[in-house]
Image (cartoon, rainbow, N blue to C red):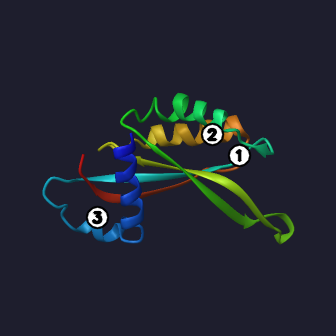
Amino acid sequence: MIRRGALLLALASGLAGCASTVEQAACPAGQERLRTAQLFLGGKAAGRPLQAAELGRFVDQEITTRFPDGVTVLDGGAQWRGPENALIREAQKVVLIVLPADGAPRRMDAVRAAYKTRFKQDSVVTVTQAACVAH
């Protein structure tokens, strides 16, 4: 999982902002055209800080079962304008996934819905992009 994690981190860093170029260009020899996904998970559960064990169970039960080839979970932070234009900041987790060839849209939707329901979140932002991937 660590090897795949390094690959995912490199993909997310190196390909951010150039997805349209990858979609048009052929992948180098030994790599295949796939998509990567980033899920931005809020760091609170029903208004309180999310515990590491809770997130671990969610990853095991909801994400790993749908994407058994591996995922990477990173610490992050989020901010946005809330009610009355107040700046809100909170801890966040970012999940990186190399998607299977079919893109797995139903599995991604199921993960998002499960997170929103379990942790009382208004949204789970998901970003997907084209990538050339070597296994």
Residue toward you, 27 or 103 = 27
Question: Residue 10 lies in what quarter of the image?
Answer: bottom left
- The three-letter amino acid code for the residue at tag 1 is Gln
Are circles 2 and 3 on residues that touch, CB within 8 Å?
A: no
**Depicted 109 relative to depicted 14: above or below:** above
- The three-letter amino acid code for the residue at tag 2 is Tyr
* Disc 2 to disc 1, C-alpha distance: 7 Å
What x and y, as percent, mark residue 29?
13, 57
Mark 1 burial class by Cα count in 10 Å: few <14, some 14-19, many 20+: some
Q: Is residue 21 visible?
A: yes
- The three-letter amino acid code for the residue at tag 3 is Glu
**Depicted 84 relative to depicted 6: above or below:** below
Are circles 2 and 1 on residues that touch, CB within 8 Å?
A: yes
* Disc 2 to disc 3, C-alpha distance: 30 Å
Residue at the spot of label 1? 121
Q: Residue at x 36, y 59 (%)?
A: 11
Q: Quadrant of the C terminus?
A: top left
**Depicted 79 relative to depicted 52: above or below:** below
Mark 3 burial class by Cα count in 10 Å: few <14, some 14-19, many 20+: some
What x and y, as percent, mark residue 123?
65, 50
Q: Residue at x 36, y 66 (%)?
A: 14
Side of 59 where 23 appears, left or right: left
Q: Residue at x 43, y 43 (%)?
A: 105
Residue situated furthest right in the rendering? 84
**Circle 2 SS class:** helix
Side of 128 where 29 appears, left or right: left
Residue at the spot of label 2? 115
Residue at the spot of label 3? 23
Q: Quadrant of the N terminus?
A: top left
* Disc 3 to disc 1, C-alpha distance: 32 Å
